[in-house]
Image (spheres, rainbow, N blue to C red):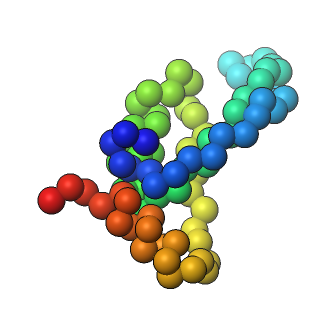
Amino acid sequence: MRNRLAAGAEITGPAVSVFWHLGELGEGQEWRVTLRTSESSRDRLAALVAERHPWDSPEVTATPIEWCLDTYAEWVERTTAAPE
């Protein structure tokens, strides 16, 4: 958040996670972090998350926004804009 690549974050969990890893079935706890960012900051934010995450292949995905209030879109763009 301090680097302003995301305008906001929502953290939910813990959730039970069941997964395959190195050929074995595993179970553990996970937390979902939803980061609100702009298209122009998306790739830099994804790279930062991947770099700092303890897993080799963290789930980093993007969900396009089909519609939102103009004021919300402006807030996200303004908040994540690169410093001049």
Q: Position of residue 61 (x, y in %)?
A: 58, 51
Residue at the spot 68% in from the left edge and 19% down from the top edge: 22
Residue at the spot 46% in from the left edge and 55% down from the top edge: 7
**Against 6, is 1 above or below?**
above
Q: Position of residue 43 (x, y in %)?
A: 39, 52
**Quarter where residue 32 is shown:** top right
Q: Position of residue 5 (x, y in %)?
A: 38, 50
In depth, the one of 73 and 43 nearer the eye is 73
Number of marks: 0
Query: Does residue 20 appear left or right of residue 76 in this picture?
Result: right
**Against 52, is 77 above or below?**
below
Query: The N terminus appears in which quarter of the rendering?
Result: top left
Residue at the spot 36% in from the left edge and 58% down from the top edge: 80
Query: The C terminus appears in which quarter of the rendering?
Result: bottom left
Query: Does residue 8 appear left or right of residue 74 in this picture?
Result: right
Residue 19 visible in the shown view: no
**Against 47, is 80 above or below?**
below
Query: Does residue 39 appear left or right of residue 55 in this picture?
Result: left
In depth, the one of 24 and 43 nearer the eye is 43
**Against 31, is 84 above or below?**
below
The residue furthest left is: 84
**Quarter where residue 69 is shown:** bottom right
In depth, the one of 57 and 51 nearer the eye is 51
